[in-house]
Amino acid sequence: MQPESEPVSWRIRRWAAPVALAVLVGAAIAGVGSAVGGKDPEAAGHLRYRMPRFMLTAGRQDPWLEVRAARSVNGQVQVVDAVRPPGSAGAVQEILAGPGGRFVVAASRNDPCETRLFQFRLTRDGHVTGLAPLRGGTTPALVAGLAMNRHGDRLAYTTAPCAPNPPNPPNAPNSPNALAPASPPRAALTVLDAGTGARRTWSAAGPSAIGEIVWARDGRTLGYATGDVVPGAGQDAAVRNVTVRATDTRAGGSGLREGRLLFRAPGGPAAVSSATMGPDGRSGHGTLRRPDAIAIFSFAEGEPLRVTSTIPQKPGTGVAIALVSSGEPRYACLNGLDAFGRAIDGEFRTTFSGFGHCDSAWGY
């Protein structure tokens, strides 16, 4: 763990094979969210680190949820709490750390196709307390891309029907392939009022993906990235016409493409890997993968894309990038252009290999 006074910096790791872009949100950082208000990470200020005390992980079946001490003792990891599935709840797919020490988990099952949302808190010694279903949080679909606003009263996510024939049996233990979203993908965004249980949904026509779901600091503006899913030359499809939009969730409308346009992908061979709205609801940041390099860029409503850094890439290698800054906590599961984790560097994987990367969270 580095000192609080260290300025924001890029962290780049090279691997032997191409890997997906990783935008790290929340892990041991108080205040995150790559570029802040459209600024370059280098200009965004200083990081303030906060050492987590616990790590929460999805146990899939038994345990359903596990809490471990963040620090090992003599090389041994201490299991603080192991939670069994409540009733007929499915396997935990996503864990979201929200404001005020609140946690939300999405648990899904295939037969019947259903996701149930639960909320809870941790005691000071790391035990789960107050585990209960979230009002209005049961839906006959799979759920991904959880995002909570900073007030903690509204939860956003995308949904997808279950595939009729999942790759593995629905109850296969510890198998991420036991559940799979149906094809073709259809972008849909739901906002749940945590107090009343009321839900509202926005959707897009045609095969499409949605991801990078995140709230602005005003608690009512919701940002998201969408892209058209078009057939590719091989087995996989491609994500094209990527846009980032911002929607006032208390205004009218029900179409995802009705939101304010913040970013539209440029033409050419570059593929958008990530594009995320910032806390101001009018700007953001992202990455483009070119044949010979990765470009990090910022964008703002009504302004052209601005490349802030270019990272050369040799053929046959990949680059994983973690962007961190001194921004505000985003309380969002940012899984890329498809919240279910199927979009990687402009390609849409038609063979589902499990949900995204939000099956763990930190407790402080």
Image (cartoon, rainbow, N blue to C red):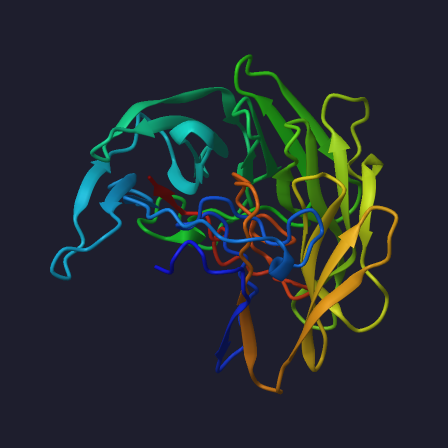
In-front residue for pair 164/286: 286
Q: Tell me: residue 63, above or below residue 177.
A: above
If the image is split into quadrants, where does the C terminus sit? Answer: top left
* Left or right of residue 75, residue 298 in this image: right
- Can residue 216 be seen here? yes
Q: Tell me: residue 120, above or below residue 72.
A: above
* Left or right of residue 337, residue 116 in this image: left
Residue drawn at 57 percent across, 53 percent down = 45
Outermost residue, bottom direction? 315
Outermost residue, front direction? 5
Question: Within the image, what quadrant is residue 140 found in?
Answer: top right
- Can residue 208 be seen here? no
Residue 65 in percent (x, y) is at: 30, 39
If the image is split into quadrants, where does the N terminus sit? Answer: bottom left
Outermost residue, top direction? 196
* Left or right of residue 169, residue 285 in this image: right
Residue 271 in percent (x, y) is at: 73, 67
In-front residue for pair 77/200: 77
Question: Within the image, what quadrant is residue 134 found in?
Answer: top left
In-front residue for pair 360/178: 360
Q: Tell me: residue 238, above or below residue 108.
A: below
* Left or right of residue 293, residue 11 in this image: left
In-front residue for pair 293/193: 293
Residue 292 in percent (x, y) is at: 70, 82
Residue drawn at 64 percent across, 30 percent down = 190
